[in-house]
Image (cartoon, rainbow, N blue to C red):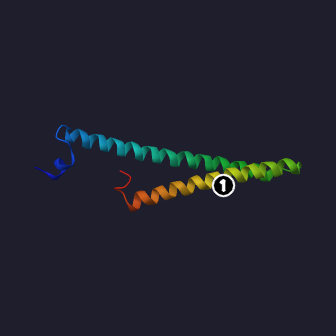
Amino acid sequence: MSDDEDDTHPNIDTPSLFKWRHEARVQKEEEFKKKKEELAAKKSKHLKEKAVINEMKGKEEEVAKLKSEWDKKDAEIKAKEEEIQKEERVRCKYPWFMR
């Protein structure tokens, strides 16, 4: 009797259980990667908007409004970046934790 048999119920097929766990782990990793890519795309688009705002001349009230909206979005993006970085640190420090 091996150690892995102690953890599973006798009516559960152990190889299937390992397969399901592996599939879940792979799916989580893909979701995390997709999340990072989406944030990178948002950040790139956001920085382009900043360049457009900086090039605008004339209507100071409109520019100020756009800058304040940009700042709000910037804060949201930074919060999401920090969240992803924290999750990545946990994944690296405790690889078993996220699996």
Question: Residue placed at 38% from the left, 52% from the top?
Answer: 98
**What residue sits right under mark 1 in the picture?**
75
Which x, y percent locates residue 90? 43, 59
Q: Left or right of 92: which side holds 39?
A: right
View extreme (right): residue: 58
Q: Say which element carries label 1.
A: helix
Residue 4 appears left or right of 50 = left
Q: Position of residue 21 (x, y in %)?
A: 30, 44
The residue that appears at 66% across and 54% down in the rendered structure is: 75
Q: Position of residue 35 (x, y in %)?
A: 51, 46
Q: Residue furthest bottom?
A: 93
Crowding near pointer 1: few (<14 within 10 Å), some, many (20+)?
few
Residue 85 percent coordinates (x, y): 51, 58
Q: Horizontal placement of 83 versus 21: left or right?
A: right
**95 in relation to 9, above or below:** below
Is residue 65 toward the left or the right of residue 91 in the image?
Answer: right
Count how many numbered circles sit on residues in the image.
1
**As rendered, which of 24 and 54 lies closer to the eye?**
24
Amino acid type, callout 1: Ala
What's the residue at 84%, 47% (across, down)?
A: 62
